[in-house]
Structure formats: C-alpha cells, structure tokens
Image (cartoon, grey):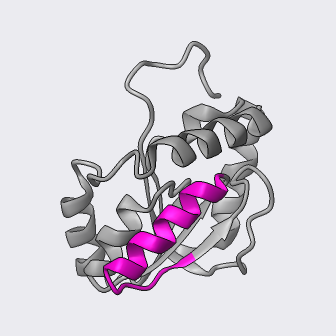
Amino acid sequence: MAKLTKLGWDKAFKKEGKIFVKPHRDMARIAKFFKKEGIRKILDLGCGSGRHLVYLAKRGFDAYGIDIARHGIKIARDWLKKERLKANLEIGDIYKKLPYKDNFFDAIIGIKTLHHEKIENIRKLIKEVKRILKPGGLIFITGHRKPPKKKIP
C-alpha cells in the first residue's frame, strides 16, 4: 500500500503543486500551546507540500518534515526558500524506521496521515514516535473525518 500511496501522492503533487496551503484549523492554538510549554523542535509526519512547516517556522519553531512524496518535499523546500524560512526535510516512509535519533523531538504532529496505512504499520509508526519523542513530549494527531471501518485495538 505504501508504494501505491507514494506514487499517488507524487503524481498529485507533480500535477497540482501545493495541494494543501492552509494550516489545520487548530494549528494556531497548537502553536500557542507549544510555545507556552517551551516546545522547540517539532516533526511533521507526512508533511506534504509544507503547509505546517511554513506555519511553524514562521513562529520560530525548529521545524522538521518527512514525506514519502519527492515532489511534495520539493514544493515544501521551494515554499520555505521563497518565505526565507528554514526547515529540515526528509524524503521517507513514515511507516518504516524514522531517520532521527532517540528522544530527539519535543513534539510531533501528524495531520491527516495515519488513515492512509494498514493498522500493523500504524502500530510500527507509534513505536517509532515513542522512540524519537523526548520523555514528556507532546503529540498532535488528526485523522480522517469518517470513522475507520476497523477499530485499532
């Protein structure tokens, strides 16, 4: 499934460009809360074309993003450059071993990404998130609007 997703997203970003440009409706509240909690280093899982990376970098966070779609990462890099912002970007599959050190991030966000994969791969991702998130770190994850057909135990 990840291969199909990669091809699908790569094709979509190549054809459409910046597919998503507005940050998630709760991002302002989340960023404010992160600031209050002293959060600095944030990873955006499935960052796509960079809408949350740009938003977070503009607010002074150390933004990191990973996405499987090469064209999405290219768009994010170009957007960040245009805005004169910096973020650390990786092309990679979030359902495999993540290329970050243990206890590296203060917070991790995943906006509408988890529902794209099988439950067993989501479990692997959760283990990786636990590994790379600092003790006491924060997580903000959203899903698809429709409830899943199968419950995640």
Res 107 seen here? no
Residue 22 highlighted magenta (yes or no): no
Give coordinates of residue 137: x percent, y percent: 48, 71
Q: Residue at x 23, y 79 (%)?
A: 36
Q: Quadrant of the C terminus?
A: top right
Quadrant of the rendered structure where residue 117 is?
top right
Residue closest to the eye, 82 or 126: 82
The vertical placement of 120 against 14, above or below, is: above
Q: Residue at x 74, y 32 (%)?
A: 4
**In the image, 150: left or right of 31?**
right
**In the image, 109: left or right of 28?**
right
Q: For the image shown, how many numbered marks are present on the structure?
A: 0
Which residue is the extreme one toward the top? 149
Q: Residue at x 45, y 19 (%)?
A: 147
Residue closest to the eye, 152 or 115: 115
Residue closest to the eye, 5 or 95: 5
**In the image, 95: left or right of 106?**
right
Residue stretch in magenta: 69-88
Give coordinates of residue 102: x percent, y percent: 71, 78
